[in-house]
Image (tube, rainbow, N blue to C red):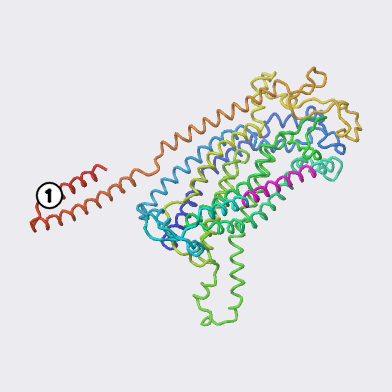
Amino acid sequence: VFRKYYGEKIGIYFAWLGFYTEMLFLAAVVGLICFLYGLFTMDENMSSKEICDPAIGGEIIMCPLCDRDCEYWRLNTTCESSQYSHLFDNVATLFFAIFMGIWVTLFLEFWKRRQARLKYEWDLVDFEEEQQQLQLRPEYEAKCTQKKRNPITQEMEPYLPLTSQAVRFCISGATVLFWVSLIIASMIAVIVYRLAVYAAFASLMENTQTLQPISGLLTPQLATSVTASCLNFVMIMILNFFYERIAIWITDMEIPRTHMEYENRLTMKMFLFQFVNYYSSCFYVAFFKGKFVGYPGAYTYMFNRWRNEECDPAGCLIELTTQLTIVMAGKQIWGNIQEAIVPWICNWWGRRKARNNPENLYSRWEQDHDLQTFGALGLFYEYLEMVIQFGFITLFVASFPLAPLLALMNNILEIRVDSWKLTTQYRRPVAAKAHSIGVWQEILNGMAILSVVTNAFIVAFTSDMIPRLVYYYAYSENEDSPMSGYINNSLSVFQISDFPERNEPKVNSENFVICRYRDYRYPPDHEKKYLHTMQFWHILAAKLAFIIIMEHVVFIVKFFVAWMIPDVPADVKAKIKREKYLTQKILHEYELEKLKERLCQGDKRATEKEFIATEGRMELSRAM
């Protein structure tokens, strides 16, 4: 229906969105099962049991979370957060990460087949988008005064000198680089906020009695992560607002030759910016936070002032889940508000002038003309929104199995909102042909490959799965309960008297002698005092081996599945060949009729040669 009314270009978008939503259903069901597995096995998790046990976690004194102002604290104060982290950090995480790597391949391959079928059904087999490359943009013709002969059409047409192109590309590249640097600077500002506020939260939650009922669930790490995620989301939206206008301006400045070239350049600029803008904070939490902390007495500092923040004793995965949930859900809610409410308000505001006018003075066609303009880039923003969402459910899905479910619910609403706004809030766009989703297909392929790498690193370095497996198989001393003692094994010992003045807490009311911290280092009475133990290197080697094995296994399966599934269905390929054969047959019969007419006129020798040539072409057509 959409294709008949709005044209193939909008029709292929809704076909892709509908197919994407259908495929999300499978991923959402599997993700929900993995989440329920974590929920039902929460009480069986030995790590959280030991943290919550007053005889184990209650007796472990942890080193202060910040310098000077923070006090020593007991490990069992993080009991609730360690239990909730098991929802996402369990063995199902590994299975779901591998499953999503294969799901992405199935989605892309089956979409190619659906796209090929639509291409045949919509009579676009012989439509080549290369034809559009011959259609110059009016802006290009107006701004380019110099002309040269087109080698294809052999006609004089305007062109942009190479020196002018080089200057414009340099300015464009510098502008994009500046804005990407601005994103990185804003992310560093959020990190500084994390480090500065982290100490305040740690001190506040330890010393304020009113926070005691929630302090077990809302740890300083989690409180910092939630507020920083909200702040980061606001900054993302602000930067997006300005960069969209900058990207259009610099693309106009480049003066692209054709409409296709214009869209491709704008797509790459916008996607690069959105990729860095939306995913940089998730990359920080996943791969950098808690990795360069140091140890008590030798902490590492950012700008030699703010001490790097540590992960929760239960791991950093729950904080990555928090970050992903806030940014992803916030973007989807804000996107639907922008798509549905903003056009409606603009149209309502524009119709105010007609409230007191009778119908004959404000006709239906005038009302339709006053609707919002969809614009040439309207579809571009729809694709961009969905591709960014695709990145959330693939790049970091190992940390949040419910991400496909959130995306599924959003897309069910998205299809209805998009169709509603196109039919009621916007003027009917000019119909255009398209037999594919264009450059977005290559972007999706690139993100599918990158997702395998990111999820392998998340499972290896962000979750606690590999350290637990190493302990289970190599360091456990209890055959009846192999994971008992893991928490004590994963915490190193620090002698409080070794604290330098900069780090030593002001108060030690209970006169503790030692404190524990999350790392694998030798104790203070060892000859290799505070150096990494052999277990640390075993875990690191296991992490690297896991990444290599998982990547190779998933890539082999991906490429095998892609090789097994043909891009064009067999019946569609046969129908296309059949149509070509019939076309050749009709031409052959037509040429035979002409040859017979010429034969009757007496040109026998030339006619025999043409007849033989025609028969040869017919045989070739049958063979093809």
Q: Image point 45% across, 46% down: which residue?
A: 111
| Crowd rating for badge 1 (residues with CA inside 10 Å; few <14, some 14–19, many 20+) | few
How many labels, in total? Answer: 1
Q: Determine whether, in the image, residue 361 is placed left or right of residue 491.
A: left
Q: Position of residue 579 (x, y in %)?
A: 28, 51
Q: Position of residue 588 (x, y in %)?
A: 20, 52
Q: Main secondary structure of the magenta part?
A: helix
Read off the magenta span: 175-197
> Which quarter of the picture shows residue 501?
top right
Under circle 1, the secondary element is: helix
Please identify the quadrant where the C terminus is shown.
top left
Q: Position of residue 523 (x, y in %)?
A: 79, 21
Q: Residue furthest top?
A: 527
Residue type at tag 1? Glu
Q: Is residue 177 magenta?
A: yes
Q: Determine whether, in the image, residue 148 is placed left or right of residue 539.
A: left
The residue wearing badge 1 is 608
Please identify the quadrant where the N terminus is shown.
bottom left
* Viewer-nearest residue: 280 or 24: 280
Q: Position of residue 459 (x, y in %)?
A: 62, 33
Q: Determine whether, in the image, residue 445 is placed left or right of residue 343.
A: left
* Viewer-nearest residue: 259 or 202: 259
Q: Determine whether, in the image, residue 11 is placed left or right of residue 339.
A: left
Examine the rendered structure and indicate whether residue 83 appears above or below residue 408: above
Q: Is residue 516 magenta?
A: no
* Viewer-nearest residue: 441 or 329: 441
